[in-house]
Amino acid sequence: MLAIKKLRVEFGARVVFKDLSFSILPKERISFAGHNGAGKSTLMKCLGGVLEPNGGGISKPKDCKIGYLPQEGIHIKGISLWDETESAFGEATSIQKQIDTLSEQLNEMDSSSEEYLELLYKIGDLDIALEKFDPNTIKPRVESVLTGLGFKRSDFTRDCGEFSGGWQMRIAMAKLFLQEPDVLLLDEPTNHLDIDSQTWMEQYLFNYSGAIVIISHDLSLLDALTTRTIAFAHGRAEEYAGNYSFYMRESKLRKEIQLKAYQAQQKEIEKTKQFIERFRAKASKASQAQSRLKQLEKIELIEIEQEDAVMSFTFPSPPPSGQSVAKLENASKAYGKLQIFKDFNFEVERGERLAIVGPNGAGKSTFCRLITGQEDPDEGLYTLGQKSKISFFSQNHADELDPNKTVLETCQAVASRENAPLVRNILGCFLFRGDDVFKKVGVLSGGERSRVALVCMLIQPANFLILDEPTNHLDVQSQAVLQNALQEYPGAYLIVSHNRSFLDPIVTKTIEFRPGEEPAIYHGNVTYYLDKKVDEKQAAKGLSKLPSTEQAAAPAQAAASKGPKISRKEQRKIDAENRQKRNKVLKPLQEEFATLEKAISEIETKQAQLTEFMSKPETLADPNKTQECTESYAKLTNQLDQAYSRWSELSEEIEQLETSLATTN
């Protein structure tokens, strides 16, 4: 589908790529790997047509569509959210507008005139062109993608300019998904998503029909989605036929093999040199020595690339804390009509490791400000432990840095005496190496400033850490450095993030925030929380659809489960009865689904028959018949639109219920 041939990209004296060649095949799932600055985003810009390479080329079929989502920099305004995303179907919308305009003209014309017939034939040609877009599904598709990415239906009419930068990226993502390009290029797509919209996006990508090329630091996503990895380092690219975990294992093996080959070659070279030195002066061996010398000159030397030093750091020794680090008692907080929580009781204890999850706008950041004492609850009491010392990282802290100071000066100003000599090493862990530390903060990108703010927070002694999206601008290596440091950290911490691969090994409790609901606490990591949410949703859906007598029996069964243990035989019988009950719920849905599919087929057949009837000369000659057919066609279109919406709802409902049944079985 795409062929990259001898691509060369350079910025001044720095050569990013030289003679880079590879291909992207239909339906492939490829990830670009490598440390920040290795050239991943640069290459993606070349593939997306944003950046012109200095040499080589990118070839593609004439009808191949490429869609590119950058990390940031998208600003849309002056158009509603719905109109902007619906413009993904721009050609279909344009054709429909032409049909509507011509249809209005048709009503005012003499049906016996040649102009009338010409206009009618033109409308027919446009109808045929419109059919390939399946226009009846456009509205439900737009609605499905927008709600999946976290937009509310009340947002549909809002101007895009009212949305913040993160939501702007979601708008661009929604439009790109609806366009369904043949090759989808995604540069850090999860950075601006909460855990719900990320879960939806992952499912969308799993079912995507085109090829996907992705850059991401979310290793869980890469492992689940991708089947091929292209790794970049030192201006070169290496291909691996597997996901990110496969790449990590295989790259280590390749380096070991390469090192052994290098060592063997060096031994052989040393032996050859010794032979030459020993016998070059002897007449009887001179010709052999000369031959060995020529062989030595022709050897293609194996080169061992210097690996980037793997740095590490440990947090400054925190002061000892009491058992209670921070506490909220009967706390309530609201912004206008939005109730974040009411009469909420929560306590952070010494050494606890907490993850905060939930959709944007649910109150996660508000909770962070309350638990640190930066903001007071509307009602209730906040108590900070007597020996608690807090260090808080927020994305807003990057904007508060002095633009006139260098990176090094900024961090040294807040470092403890104990940590001052280690500042440069810690900066290196977070991608500030060599002369980078002498850059002024004012010239840094938003991501770089965020990393400086993170380092400033990490080097201050504290026994309670609050980190709000700390991994958004970190590469995989830097994430590992922070993750390892947190594993060894003896104090308490609370992390707002959706990055499962980062959180899972280091948190033991997950708190979920949802608009209008009380926070829910799950005693496990994020994967445990997601699994429990699926179980809860299926259980609630299954219970709500049971007959009333079964609903009445459910509490009794729950109470009975607290009694004496039952035998395995009895348990199997209960399990079988439960599955039978759930199947009673599934069967009616499947029957409705089959009926609906049949109805959709019948409506589409009627539309085709009506179109054929409308094109007959005797119909065209009768204005009354033409008008009647036009109205009938509009009614059928409306019925089909409603049927497709219900079809989409049923599909999701049946899929979720089948998953629940499979889990039960």
Image (cartoon, rainbow, N blue to C red):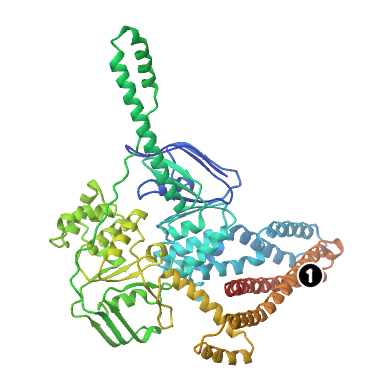
Image spot of residue 399 (x, y percent): 27, 63
How many badges with numbers are in the image? 1
Q: Is residue 429 left or right of residue 83?
A: left
Amino acid type, residue under disc 1 in the picture: Cys
Vertical arrangement, residue 231 with respect to residue 394, above or below: above
Vertical arrangement, residue 100 with respect to residue 657, above or below: above
Q: Badge 1 is on which residue?
A: 629
Q: Secondary structure at mark 1?
A: helix
Q: In the picture, residue 473 is in which quadrant?
A: bottom left
Q: In the picture, residue 251 is in which quadrant?
A: top left
Instruction: Pick the residue in front: 596 or 261.
Output: 261
- Quarter of the image for the C terminus: give it: bottom right
Instruction: Report if residue 440 is visible in the image.
Output: no
Instruction: Pick the residue in front: 657 or 445.
Output: 657
Image spot of residue 38 (x, y percent): 37, 46
Image spot of residue 394 (x, y percent): 29, 67
